[in-house]
Image: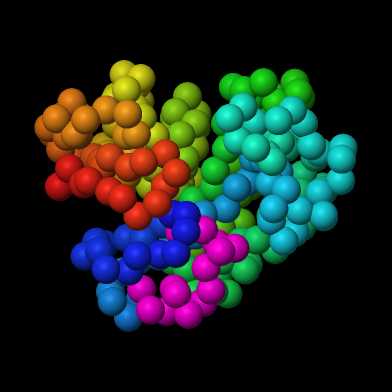
Amino acid sequence: MSGTVDQSYNVVMYDIDMFDNSASVVKSLHKAGRIVICYIDAGTWENWRPDAGQFPNSVKGKPVSGWLGERWLDIRQLSILESIMTARIQLCQSKGFDGVEFDNVDGYTNNTGFPLSYNEQLAYNTWLANTAHSNRLSVALKNDLDQISDLLPYFDWALDEQCFQYSECSKLMPFINAGKAVMEVEYSLNTTNFCLKANSMNFNSMKKHLNLGSYRVACR
């Protein structure tokens, strides 16, 4: 997802950064028959993004552990975030992407600096999904496993990290049972420790490095 996109992989879908990639990259991938998903961080402020100056200090919370330059967002302040996130979604659509992956949409389970509730997260995530759909984009639920029962009707597929490492993959089965795809990635485990199980659950799993470069070992 990060760095220059290696377009040589014979895969169904590419998930790449929305800001870092131009419409020409999306067009080239489409020409090769790929579905192209844009990555948008909807739950944290990133100080290197071109629209970073649009976020007032009032919506910036605690730093995100392990990720320099990121701070959690106060998702309760939708009156402020709505225009910023809508512009990002519209830029994704205008570049020709097919869908969107929203990251960090489980702030209510983290130490954000704000007293975010389950229902407030639910409202924000539902708004994100509906706005993506109104811009003709498919939308993935990233992690946020404990809200799947409520969010399943609004999201088209799931993208999860390290569910085998943390023994929580069963929580993703509602997507499979609803005929919706599950994309899953592991960073620490060897493929011998999760691929057979992933395939039996009909997950599209792979191993990647945490820096999300082009390295990948797919289970199928």
Residue 15 screen position, x and y as percent: 41, 57
Q: Residue at x 42, y 47 (%)?
A: 212
* Residue depicted at x 38% and y 79%: 28
Task: List x then y, in percent, for residue 23.
Answer: 51, 77
Apparent side of residue 103 relative to residue 208 in the rendered image (left or right): right
Q: Front-most of 153 and 27?
A: 27
Q: Is residue 20 left or right of residue 191?
A: right
Magenta highlight on residue 123: no
Q: Which image quarter is the N terminus in?
A: bottom left
Closest to the observer: 157 or 53?
A: 53
Residue 118 seen anywhere in this rendered image of the structure: no
Magenta range: 16-29
144, above or below 84, in the image: above
The answer to whether residue 43 is above or below residue 19 is above
- Horizontal and vertical percent position of residue 161: 39, 34
* Nearer to us in this view, 11 or 2: 2
Kindly indicate the quadrant of the structure image that contains residue 75.
top right
